[in-house]
Structure formats: C-alpha cells, structure tokens
Image (cartoon, rainbow, N blue to C red):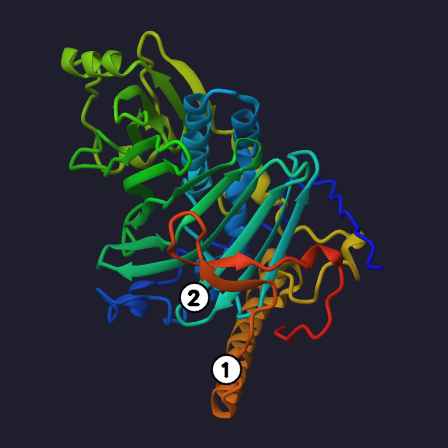
Amino acid sequence: MILFVRLYIPHSRTSLPASMFSRNDFSIWSILRKCIGMELSKITMPVIFNEPLSFLQRLTEYMEHTYLIHQANASSDSIERMKCVAAFAVSAVASQWERTGKPFNPLLGETYELVREDLGFRLISEQVSHHPPVSAFHAEGLKKDFVFHGSIYPKLKFWGKSVEAEPKGIITLELPKYNEAYTWTNPTCCVHNIIVGQLWIEQYGNVEVLNHKTGERCCLNFKPCGLFGKELHKVEGYILDKSKKKVCSLYGKWTECMYIVDYAALEAHKKSGKGTVEKKSMEEISLPEADTVEVIPGSYLLWRIAPRPVNSTEMYSFTSFAMQLNELDKDMDGLIPKTDCRLRPDIRAMENGDIDLASEEKKRLEEKQRAACKTHSKSDDELKTKWFQQGQNPHNGSQDWLFSTGYWNRNYPLLPDIY
C-alpha cells in the first residue's frame, strides 16, 4: 500500500537570498528590434530580464486569495457565490502589478507543487507541451470542497514599445457541494515602455465568468488605460441572473480592490459625473499613488489586495506569497519529485544572486531540452506527460489538459532527467 504523505511547509521566508539585478546596463531593444509583430515563445532572452520563478510558479499565484473560494462555498445563494468567484477571478491577476520580470519558460516535463494547509489547498502543475508552450495546473481543497484547474498557453507578442501577453486557455472552478462549475479566461496583459522610460503594466479585455449549472454569469471589463490614463487598472462589470437580468454591478481596480453595488446606483453615479478624475501624464499613472477607487454610496467590499512587503521593490516586486514559492525546505528532500521547479539550477542561481551561473545553466538546460526533443523526434517516440492527459473540458467541451491523479501518492518512477 502506498501511504499518503501530507507536506506542510511553514512559509516563513520574507525575502529572497539576494536582491534583484539592475537592468539599466542592458538593452532589450538589441534583442527585440527584429521581432516586431512576432510571437516570442521561441526567442531566447538574456537571463537578466527574468525573475527567479518558473511560469508554473507564477500560475500558482492564482491561489493567493483562496479565501474567496471558501467564502463562495459558505454561501447558500448562487448570486452571492458568483460575486465571490468573480472577485477571485480578478484577484488571480493582481500579483502581476509592477512585475516586469519575465518568469522562466518551464522545461517539458517540469512540475511544481504547493501544499498550503493554512489556506486549505494543494496544487500540482506540469509543463505538458513545448511548442506551443502549455502549462497545466490542478488545485483542490484539502477538505475536497473545491477543484480549480486549467491549461494556459501564454502567447507573447512584441509591438515595438510594448510586449503583449495573451493567456490563452480556459480556467475552471468546481464547487462539488453545489454541483456547480464556473469557467472563464484571463484578460490580456501588456508591459509598456520596453525600449525607454519607466515600465508599467496594464490588463485589458472582457472576461465572462459562467456558472454552467444555473446559467448565471458575470461580465467583467478590464479597461484599457486610454490616452490620459483615466481608466488605468479599472475593472467594471455586472452579474446577470438566469433570466439575463442585471442584478448588481462590480467595480474597482485589479491592483487594489473590488466592490459590489446595486446596478442602478452605479449607472446613476456615472451619469452624475462624480466618477471623473484629473488627467495624468503617462509617467504619473504608473505610480502606485494613482491607484485609488472612489467608493459609491451603498457599496460593500468584495476583495482587497494584500499589502506588498516593504522590500518588494528590491525583490522583483514580489508579493509575500510569491517570495515563498521557490523556498526549498530540508523536509522536502526526497519528497518532491526531481522535476520540481525548486530543484532547477538556473532559477536557484538567479535567486542566490549568481547571474553568470544562472545564464550558463539556462543555456545548458535549453540545449539539453532541444537535444531531447530532437532525439525523440527522430525515433518517433513522443515525449509523454506524466500527470495530465489531453481531453475535453467536461463543462464547455473545449480542448483541455486534465489531471490524471496519482501524483499525491508520492511514488515517482521513471521521471525524465530534465535538469
């Protein structure tokens, strides 16, 4: 019998071993000038433009505000549950604020796990495809009270002054207590002033959260910045009941907080002109001081972002949650599989402040992956995923990568040697 082993991680780290490197002496233009309009997944970037996390770890940051899922489970009303799920969908991208470093591209077969007993979940993710790069994740409540899963293909494009990241892929949240499933897609993320000036980030696009059981939906609009920055970081939306009646509105900023208010109250507030703000220059709008939400009378708070640690700017603008993701505790030795991101040498070297070693290891790992793919291509022996299988999403029928169980048995034979 294989015994189930629960891994508890204390999560006490409040800083990284070394501060981030200055990028002032490096020109990204020399690399990207031939890539305007191109998809960037095949472009090799110098390690100085990375942050010391894998994209699999970046995905795990969706789980920082898991308490919103628990709040949804605690409500007997489906509209109240939708409010919590919608807030969770917004909170899932909040950690990207001011995160201008690029996460490391995961290697094929790379994995990452996180167990947080304090937050009530465990998560496993795997890089399931190299070209196109697809990352699959599966999180579940420790009390079997929810399942949260998805597969993301981050499509990157360079547009001359900005890099746009379109996170293709469906995200699914299941609440077994109510036999409900919710699906949505993330907004597009854009990093501006790539060539010159202060880097700043915006999210834009429409996000629809659908409850497949009741037919209720929440329509969210992540607003583009606009010419004078009036709409920067703003999110507005509304919830439709099963008869398609607008029952309430949501508003706020993905960098700060979200409120709920009666739909008519929000519309009246807009018509009154009270929501107008002073025009700001493009330099001013990138500063945190510009992020304020005017609270409409009758509103109540759905979600507020956790404060960043005081040393965040020196630590790649990481949140407290992100600061702990690559922590390698001695109790993990022999427990986590050898494919886990925490054991990846280039990320570890960068975290420890050795940029030369990080660059050498990144190059070595990329060459090793190319050689492995070439070998398998010649032999027609397709590299197989270990923990996820391609299939149909059971709720909307789209192509997805679904967890195939077995990981938490802690039995890891025949894993690929990727590091």
Name the residue at 31% across, 12% down: 296
The answer to which of marks 2 and 1 sits earlier in the sequence is: 2
Q: Please, is residue 181 above or below residue 126 in the view?
A: above
Name the residue at 39% across, 69% down: 132
Image quarter hosting the C terminus: bottom right
Quarter of the image for residue 274 reads top left
Residue furthest to the top in view is: 297
Give the residue pinned by disc 2: 133
Three-letter residue code for mark 2: Pro
Specify the label residue 285 is tagged with: none
Report crowding for label 2: few under 14, some 14 to 19, many 20 or more residues within 10 A (C-alpha).
Answer: some
- How far apart marks 2 and 1 lie (CA) works out to 13 Å
Report crowding for label 1: few under 14, some 14 to 19, many 20 or more residues within 10 A (C-alpha).
Answer: some
Q: Are marks 2 and 1 in contact (CB under 8 Å)?
A: no
**Where in the figure is residue 298, as x and y percent of width and height?**
35, 8
Give the residue pinned by disc 1: 373
Q: Please, is residue 345 above or below residue 382 in the view?
A: above
In the foreground, 23 or 263:
263
In the foreground, 344 or 271:
271
Three-letter residue code for mark 1: Cys
**Where in the figure is residue 15, as x and y percent of width and height?**
63, 43
Whether residue 130 sits left or right of residue 326 in the image: it is left
**Where in the figure is residue 347, as x and y percent of width and height?**
58, 61
Name the residue at 45% across, 51% down: 394
Residue 52 in sight from this viewpoint: no
Residue furthest to the bottom in view is: 378
In the foreground, 159 or 75:
75
**Where in the figure is residue 335, as x and y percent of width and height?**
77, 58
Residue 349 in sight from this viewpoint: yes
Quarter of the image for residue 90 reads top left
Q: Please, is residue 375 above or below residue 139 in the view?
A: below
